[in-house]
Image (spheres, coloured by chain):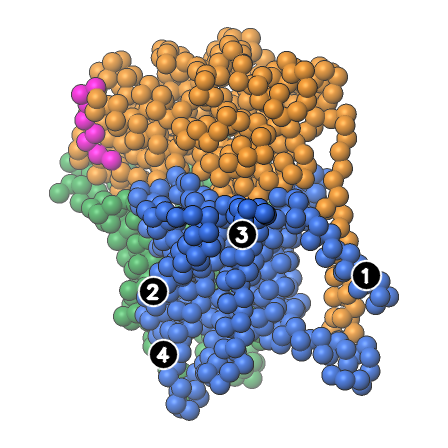
Chain colours: A green, B orange, C blue
Amino acid sequence: MQSFIQHLLNGASLGSIYALVALGYTMVYGILQFINFAHSEVYMMGAFVAYFAARLMGYVDSPGIDALILCLMAAMAGCAVIGLTIERFAYRPLRNAPRVNVLITAIGISLFLQYSGQVVFGADPKVFPNLIQDRALFEFNGVEFRSMDLTIFLVTLFILLSLQYLIFKTKTGSAIRAVSQNPLVARLMGINVERTISLTFAIGSSLAGVGSVLVGLKYPKIEPLMGTMIGLKAFVAAVLGGIGSLPGAVLGGFVMGLSEEMVVAYLSSTYRDALAFGILIIVLIVKPSGLLGVQRVEKV
Amino acid sequence: MNMNNIFSSSRLALMVFALVAVASSCTKKDSNEILVGHYGSMTGGEATFGLSTDEGIKLAVEEVNAAGGIKGKKVKLITMDTEGKAEQAAAVVTRMIKQEKVVAILGEVASSRSLAAAPIAQESKVPMITPSSTNPKVTEVGDFIFRTCFIDPFQGTVMAKFAVENLKVKKIAILRDVKSDYSVGLADFFAQKLKEMGGEIVSDSSYQSGDLDFKAQLTQMKAKSPEAIFIPGYYTEVGLIARQARDLGITAPLLGGDGWDSPKLSEIGQKSIDGAYFSNHYSNESTEPVAVEFLKNFKTKFSKEPDGLSAAGYDAAKVLFKAMESTADWNPMAIREQIAKIKEHNGVTGKITIDDKRNATKSAVVVQVQGATNKFVTTINP
Amino acid sequence: MKNLLWALLAASIVTVVADVSVDAFVQLMFIYVIINAILALSLNLINGITGQFSLGHAGFMAVGAYVSAYLSSVTSVFSPFGQLVFFPLLALMGGLAAAAAGFCVGLPSLRLKGDYLAIVTLGFGEIIRVLLLNTPAVGGARGFYGIPGPVDLDLGFLVISKFYVNCWYSLFWFSICFISLWRLKNSAFGQKFFSVRDDEIAAEAMGVDTTKTKVLAFVISSFFAGVAGSLFAHYANYINPASFGFQRSVDVIIMVVLGGMGSLSGSVVAAVFVTLLPELLRPLQEITGVDLRMVIYASCLVLLMILRPQGLFGSKEWVHVMRSWRLRFYGRKSA
């Protein structure tokens, strides 16, 4: 029994990470209706930005909450800049191109960042600095729950709530929603569509930055290819929950994390990755719009 | 872009393409240099292993050239990237032999890629030395294929013996990397030997290299209360596994193989990996002059500590150069003869003797991780 | 100027042919080009002609390769002449197995469009890879070693080296693939596929069974991908799951996009380019010291999509492109 509870906690903590990265995917899809394959590499860059920032500012040896905040800011800023650059130079020229082209461009950028990362940062794994203490929060009957897991969970929840507030209660949020519904009419209404899209990218990318720092703290090994698997699974989570829906992304993340944990624990650890896709396929066949998504009717 | 531009630029492209095609089929040869090829993963998921090996080899090349080369001729190293793919390994080795005309080849780390390339080296009668492929099948391809490292059956036996005889544990759990045939092979031989010695495998789970979270497997393992856990993977994951195991409250000692050998192991694993044991070619606190020299020179050249793969690459290159010193002739056949005769070469990774199966006979040491040092515990002879 | 261009082209072709007969590396590249061409052509059917987006092509190739390799390990060739029939038969088996896989993938994916379909096909490709990784019977991570391949054919008065035997197989399947797809494209039956690409709802309204069409596209396409996989397995004599990952699918997509979605000759030309370009770029690495090939490769892909998204030939074929060339150079002469 205690194993099962431990598995639940493990799965939930894994899930919150997927949720965090999934939020970025879902934001971009919501506004542009396309999968930003490069998101996983933006995530990876965030980790490296934070890594170098920590080394530059000498925080490697003196951890603390101020170190954490500064590295988070650095990662968020770095990711936002990278996301904006990609949007401006790679996606904007293709705004009216067929979807296939944009998808391929995204794949190209993803590969470009991966390989440049290997050349520039070196292919060897780096140790992410220990910026805050990870303590065992409670230990009950052999079940462990750590402070890092709680932190990640709380941060994810906080971000979800802030985003919900932003999207539904602010003017900027209305602009974002307007552009995602109908860019042409939004433009007619006086909304600066380009700026809104850029803003969405910036926000989505900076979320990836937050995710990468938290993951770096929990699993202190970073390397240029770290984004691939997490990105793919987070994307599955976003689709599972209903792409375009923020709570859906978080829900999807948790479902992914928990099912992955349970399969590895009770079935077989060898099929972990296959499971992620298996879930995706089943959900998409049964309910293509995802758990919390809205069915879009295609009109002639 | 108007139509004119497209067609003139495609004309240009076609011309360039034609020129390059003609040019690349011409080969250039500088008869004052000895061409040695190294094929490894320089990009892709296993780039860190290929690059480490390459660094060790480069150091060896630099040293031999600084000492005047081999019989007056300088060694030129040609490194080609396999991108971690088996078919690229085959293509690259073919290119190195046919186009670059190398006289010998070093590589690869992964047995799967060595297996893809070895038949080509064998058929073309060019000697190939693999510094780190541990699958017994690699040298079975033919008499031109050598290795300067352990083979899986031996290393698996080493740790099984250590566990039963030194640590006195019988119930062991295995956590293997299913994506790496090194890990799978080592795990299989370990399990086999352990059973022979009366031990029991209480749990056998797997992960894939690149995974970050192992809590699911570890939690399952914990429920079976193993007395020790054997993790025959690479340092890239072991550090994290150790941390998560300790986080979950697993106190059993951890055991591993030479894939653990890297300064990054204790950097990532920190306190959690302290006290763990693994089998290796040498201990980095060894006072052997060869090892000390190597550590010093490597640090000077690359500003970082070497890992086991660099040491292996260095030794393989040195063995090759030693063989070349003794040849009368430069052709690959003669070089091959001399490699087969290498006895008691004083390498960083131990005394290397090439046996009649073209594998290296050398002892393994078991070391214990203590911070950045791997403390010597015991030697196990073949 | 034109003459110079043709002369250079002729010279390079002569060099290539000369090389091919003696240089094993060029031979290797030649066979790989043909295999990649078959892959590109088959993916073009789904992506270019039917307008679906499949990112899991490597999975079908893997199925074909492994099935063919496994069958060859449990049966045996009777004689060197038997191999002329044996290996095409194996490729056929591999292709059929892959076609079955294509059917399984195509059918459930029908409800999905665009991006979703892309991800689901990617998922299927990955699932196949993971399944193979965990099947010890075909080697798992260690790979399938020692796959029998074509051997030299001793005719008594002449020995045909195994390279030429390989050429025969690859070119045989390549022609079947190219000709059938060409016929398909230019036939009334083929127009169904184009109609699904252009406007699915209108096609349904016109009475085209879009479901059947899409599934058929997947099945035919995966058949040829399986054949390509089988050719690959028997030529390389060693396969492991890592060769059939997402990277491979991306390579094939690049070929299709570069050549032009819907252009069969474009896919072939692009296959030549994409297979040879990394090899041609290798000298660059010796100069700079770092391996920038993959970085260049990826940036070329991005630039291609931004600057010339229709690829080399758009959806036209080589003949059409040549026609407009001729019009341009020779004026209003015969088209």
Q: Residue furthest bottom?
A: C206
Quarter of the image where one finds residue A232: bottom left
Of the two numbered discs 1 and 4 on the same chain, state the one appearing first in sequence: 1
Nearest to N terminus: mark 2 or mark 1: 1
Rendered position, B342 above or below A133? above
Give the main secondary structure, helix, strand or loop, of the magenta stretch.
strand
Nearest-to-viewer mark from 3 and 1: 3
Distance of label 3 from label 1 (alpha carbons): 31 Å
Q: Residue at x 48, y 14 (%)?
A: B353
Mark 2 belongs to which amino acid?
Answer: Ala
Q: On the image, numbered disc 3 is attached to which residue?
A: C165
Looking at the rendered structure, the kind of residue marked 3 is: Val
Badge 1 marks a residue whose secondary structure is helix
Q: Are marks 4 and 3 in contact (CB under 8 Å)?
A: no
Label 3 marks which chain's residue? C
Circle 4 is placed at which residue position?
Answer: C211
Write the residue at 30% across / 31% down: B188
